[in-house]
Amino acid sequence: MLRDTLTENPLQCVECNGEVAPERLGFSERLAKEIANWRGISRSLFLLWLDSSEYAEWAAEKLLDRNGTVNVRGRELVDQLNQFVQAYYWWFKDTELDDPLMPTTCPNCGAALDPFEGRDFQKCDACSILV
């Protein structure tokens, strides 16, 4: 899955949450650079949200915006990664809300989410998104 966990490598195994070495997947240097660029944007927004200062609400809006740069690029990267291995995009969830509800529909297409067997999150296979 493509998910920034504040480490250098935003590629994680869905089953064990361990990092997946990019060289194991065999994609191009160009794709590696695009992933690194996405990580920078995602991390910047996440850190602004995490800081809980005057930018937190703005950052959360950007992280939740299905048409926002971070999510559009992230989904495009997952489409490219799917050529090498089944990949998913980890969708941001604002856990700072008073009552953060578990979403029941895909934040991208609106279809019902399916459980991901053995995990506490849900998926949309059509969009390759995990929530």
Image (cartoon, grey):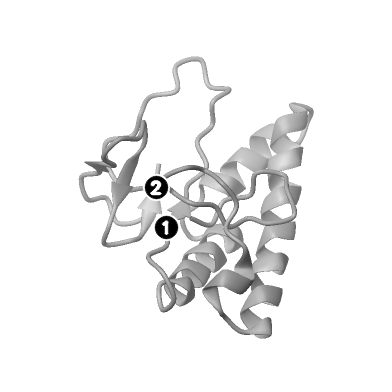
| Image location (x, y in percent) of residue 86 | 37, 65
Query: In the rendered image, which quarter is residue 96 located in?
Result: top right
Q: Mark 2 falls on what kind of element?
A: strand
Compared with residue 46, is residue 72 higher up or lower down, i.e. above or below?
Answer: below
Residue type marked 2: Leu
Compared with residue 17, is residue 26 higher up or lower down, i.e. above or below?
Answer: below
Q: Mark 1 falls on what kind of element?
A: loop
Between 47 and 128, the one nearer to me in the picture:
128
Q: Quadrant of the C terminus?
A: top left
Judged left or right of residue 74, residue 55 is: right
Q: Which mark is residue 130?
A: 2
Q: Would you say the residues marked 2 and 1 are in contact, meaning their CB atoms lie under 8 Å apart?
A: yes
Badge 2 local density, few (<14 within 10 Å), some, or many (20+)?
A: many
| Image location (x, y in percent) of residue 58 | 67, 40
Residue that badge 1 annotates: 88
Between 39 and 8, the one nearer to me in the picture:
8
Residue type marked 1: Tyr
| Image location (x, y in percent) of residue 124 | 29, 52
Residue at (27%, 36%) from the top-left corner? 104
